[in-house]
Image (spheres, grey):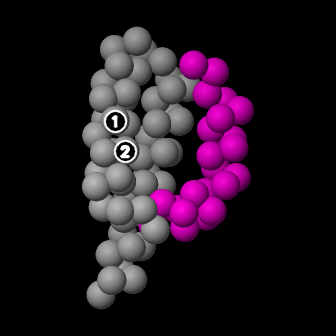
Amino acid sequence: MNSAPKLRHLLVDRESNVTTMATWPWTKTSRHLDLIDEQLGWAFQQRNDAAIAYLEEFRRQVVTARSQRLDEEE
């Protein structure tokens, strides 16, 4: 996985990504977190630092989106 350009894109579009994911159903963001965790396990086993950085940022964005949605529902 060549994650450097993907990571840059993920970081540039952070606010848009979070806003979009905040509209997703809880089950969808939950499934994304599960998949990210599985992929992180693989990336750690492979010692793939670029993939780890990408997946950790993606995970942060999903968690931020879930927090934003929770705030909006209160």
Identify the residue shown where x is 46% and y is 68%.
23
Asked if marks 1 and 2 touch (Cβ < 8 Å), the reply is: yes
Q: Nearer the viewer, residue 24 or 18?
A: 24
Image vertical order of residue 74 relative to residue 1, above or below? below
Q: Is residue 19 visible?
A: yes
Regarding mark 2 in the picture, which secondary structure is present there?
helix
**Left or right of residue 47, residue 19 in this image:** right
Image vertical order of residue 12 relative to residue 7, above or below? below
Regarding mark 1 in the picture, which secondary structure is present there?
helix
Marks 1 and 2, Cα distance to the nearest angstrom? 5 Å
What x and y, as percent, mark residue 60? 43, 52
Q: Is residue 44 visible?
A: no
Q: Quadrant of the C terminus?
A: bottom left
Identify the residue shown where x is 71% and y is 32%.
5
Q: Quadrant of the N terminus?
A: top right
Indicate the quadrant where residue 72 lies: bottom left
Indicate the quadrant where residue 9 lies: top right
Residue 73 image label: none
Spot the residue most to the top: 46
What x and y, as percent, mark residue 39? 37, 27
Q: Mark 2 = which residue?
A: 32
